[in-house]
Image (spheres, grey):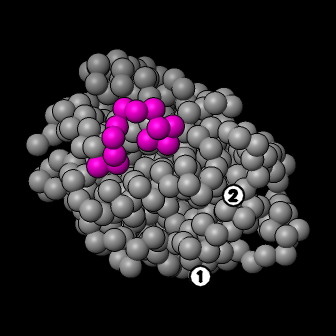
């Protein structure tokens, strides 16, 4: 992509030079809260904000370092904030006019709010044209308004299609990894060990918010249904009833796991992946990003203690849901937008983005990277996901946290049979009404 800006860079540098001269060496100015500054060497400084993640931060610093070394007029300065504080800082700087950055790495779901409030700078035509041609469908979903895009993808956020398996326990039992939905349910039934509600071994732990939501919606799509109709939720279909009933039955009939991952009964940070790390789960559908967590927190090794294999699509239609994942955006009120997009163009260069995806164990947002044999060679455990990426469907233009919490509450109520709902159909009607009302849809 770097060639795209070759013809523009002279103009960019002239703009930056005049901006630097107007500010004076080593000073800073503010426009609407966003910083545009010049270092002592007269360079245009671009402030980049991300959240604290050791592997991600190291990768960003290295790419920034290479970019800065190649520049005589631009310097990118990265700063990383604790995740728990990060969204609030972005909200303050982007939507409330506080001091902020010139580039943000943000979770894609936040993009809906930022785009709606006109807080972001449009992606330059030359950049977005190439991205649209090379990107998978879900990775740009939250950043499109009309025919304009306001962010660029860092990853393909995939919470469906992959599954962690407890290699030690499978080897001990001498059974192969299941490959079909029926095989998974049968193995889960046979390997679950519980004493009432307390589980020593969860055969299939799927009730964390991400997995529950994407399994429910994917099952609807894969059996020929839809859940998003005329810009609102519609759960009145046989496919939706079948999907939720199947998931409830896994708890109340098949007894393959309990609700700890849904309710946080063993701590808010504990879910199926943690249970597998503790040797208390056989199979856990999850995105590949949790692999580094198992390695760091539980000293587990992929290929030795656990493996990452395919989690099959339930129905005959090859389709699954995916959210827009981590992305980059430039605020509308920055004074150094041209320089910011120059850096992002550098970051999106295939070599740099592939390096970042490998180091961060991310699925690439670009087909040219995901289908490159070199990527699979460097990150072999993601291979089970690569041949289904084209089947990914953008989950939808809504706050996914609201959906996940609402679905979780309905699911727990049905599984505990607390009497709130007389049937799955009634529960889905209630969920549909709640979501459409809360999100002001339709």
Tell me which numbered mark, 2 or 1, is placed earlier along the sequence.
2
Name which quarter of the figure residue 37 lies in: top left
Residue 327 versus residue 420: which sits nearer the camera?
420
On the question of residue 244 being in view, the answer is: yes
Residue that numbered label 1 is attached to = 373
Q: Nearer the viewer, mark 2 or mark 1?
A: 2
Name which quarter of the figure residue 284 lies in: bottom right
228, above or below 312, in the image = above
Q: Is residue 296 left or right of residue 375?
A: right
Q: Which residues are magenta?
A: 414-425
Residue drawn where x is 76% and y is 43% of the image: 195
Residue 203 — which label? 2
380, above or below 27, in the image = below
Residue drawn where x is 85% and y is 70% of the image: 173
Is residue 259 one of those drawn in magenta?
no
Residue 396 versus residue 232: which sits nearer the camera?
232
423, above or below 223, in the image = above
Residue drawn where x is 58% and y is 27% of the image: 82
Residue 28: percent from left, percent from top: 40, 20
Residue drawn where x is 55% and y is 39% of the image: 262
Residue 316 versus residue 112: which sits nearer the camera?
316
Is residue 419 one of those drawn in magenta?
yes
Residue 332: percent from left, percent from top: 25, 35
């Amino acid at each position: 992509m770097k060639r795209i800006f070759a013809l523009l860079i002279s103009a960019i540098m002239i703009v930056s030079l005049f901006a630097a001269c107007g500010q004076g060496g080593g000073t800073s100015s503010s426009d609407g809260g966003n910083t545009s500054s010049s270092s002592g060497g007269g360079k245009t400084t671009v402030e980049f904000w991300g959240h604290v993640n050791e592997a991600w931060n190291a990768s960003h610093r290295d790419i920034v370092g290479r970019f800065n070394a190649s520049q005589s007029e631009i310097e990118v300065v990265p700063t990383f904030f604790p995740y728990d504080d990060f969204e609030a800082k972005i909200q303050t700087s982007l939507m409330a006019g506080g001091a902020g950055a010139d580039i943000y790495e943000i979770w894609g779901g936040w993009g809906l709010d930022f785009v709606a409030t006109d807080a972001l700078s449009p992606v330059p035509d030359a950049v977005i044209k190439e991205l649209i041609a090379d990107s998978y469908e879900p990775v740009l979903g939250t950043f499109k308004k009309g025919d304009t895009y306001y962010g660029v993808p860092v990853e393909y956020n995939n919470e469906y299609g992959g599954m962690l398996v407890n290699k030690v326990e499978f080897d001990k039992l001498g059974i192969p990894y299941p490959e079909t939905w029926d095989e998974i349910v049968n193995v889960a039934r046979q390997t679950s060990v519980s004493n009432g509600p307390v589980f020593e071994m969860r055969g299939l732990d799927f009730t964390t918010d991400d997995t529950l939501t994407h399994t429910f919606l994917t099952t609807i799509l894969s059996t020929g249904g839809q859940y998003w109709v005329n810009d609102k939720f519609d759960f009145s279909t046989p496919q939706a009833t079948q999907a939720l009933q199947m998931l409830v039955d896994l708890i109340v009939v098949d007894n393959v796991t309990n609700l700890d991952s849904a309710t946080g009964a063993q701590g808010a940070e504990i879910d199926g992946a943690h249970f597998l790390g503790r040797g208390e789960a056989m199979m856990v559908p999850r995105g590949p990003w949790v692999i580094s967590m198992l390695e760091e927190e539980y000293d587990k090794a992929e290929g030795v203690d656990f493996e990452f294999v395919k989690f099959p699509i339930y129905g005959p239609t090859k389709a699954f849901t995916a959210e827009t994942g981590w992305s980059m955006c430039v605020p509308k009120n920055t004074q150094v937008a041209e320089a910011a997009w120059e850096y992002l163009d550098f970051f999106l260069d295939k070599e740099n983005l592939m390096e970042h995806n490998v180091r961060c164990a991310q699925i690439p947002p670009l087909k040219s990277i995901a289908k490159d044999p070199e990527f699979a060679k460097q990150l072999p455990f993601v291979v089970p996901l690569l041949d289904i990426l084209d089947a990914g469907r953008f989950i939808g233009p809504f706050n996914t946290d609201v959906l996940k919490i609402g679905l979780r509450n309905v699911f727990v109520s049905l599984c505990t049979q607390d009497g709130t709902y007389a049937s799955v159909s009634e529960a889905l009607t209630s969920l549909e009404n709640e979501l459409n009302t809360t999100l002001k849809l339709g």
